[in-house]
Image (cartoon, rainbow, N blue to C red):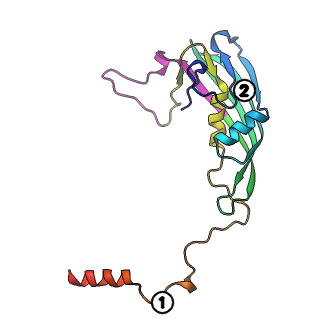
Amino acid sequence: MIDRNATDKKKRAPVSHEVNVHRLARKGMAVLIKADESERKSLADEHDLLSVERFTADLTVRPWKADGVRITGTVEADITQACVVTLEPVSSHIKEDVSATLVPEGSRLARNEIDGGEFVLDAEGPDMPDTFHGSIIDVGALVEEFFTLGIDPYPRKAGAVMEAGQPEDEAPKEPGPLYEGLRKLGQKS
């Protein structure tokens, strides 16, 4: 998980965009992130991509319950990766929905315990809110997490096929010395 507290960051997110949660209006605020050329280059380097041609996030950041923050919207990007088979460039479009709830550290809303220290997990229920401390959160770092989810871990150029092992017509006709050794070992036992 990326630490969304900008004051504790040793390394800023490539598309850092800080929001002061104590200054949010009740109806929330719109946040539009458009990565410039240097930010796109940093994103490409950070995620082992050949390039990021476009990166935008359209978000709404609004107060949630007493002291939490709710962030919703979408992140879109056009990227180029290396094909895992041919290493040729493969272009793709990413569009991910962004949805996250953040609460301050120590908030009762961040706890999911009952008496005795046991954790209560509901697989079908909503996710636990992430936590932040201080008054500044980096929504750019959050958006980058969702961007990462959209990256194909094994991009393939159309028609690229990975050949598996030796073709059948090239398989050895005679058993090798290793096979003979194993066979003899099996006869002794």
Q: Is residue 98 above or below residue 104?
A: below
Q: Is residue 53 above or below residue 6?
A: below
Left or right: 158, with 120 as reference point = right
Snapshot quadrant of residue 161? bottom right
Residue 29: image location, x then y, percent: 73, 17
Question: Which residue is pictured at 72% across the width and 48% down the height?
Answer: 50
Name the amino acid, label 1: Lys
- Front residue of this view, candidates 176 and 32: 176
| In the image, residue 106 lies in the stretch drawn in magenta | yes
Quick one: label 1, few (<14), some, or many (20+) residues within 10 Å?
Answer: few
Residue 137: image location, x then y, percent: 62, 20
Quarter the C terminus occupies: bottom left
Give the residue at mark 1. Answer: 173
- Which mark, residue 77? none
Precedes in sequence: disc 1 or disc 2: 2
Residue 13: image location, x then y, percent: 64, 30
- Which mark, residue 59? 2
Name the amino acid, label 2: Leu
Question: Magenta segment range?
Answer: 98-123
- Front residue of this view, candidates 153 and 6: 6
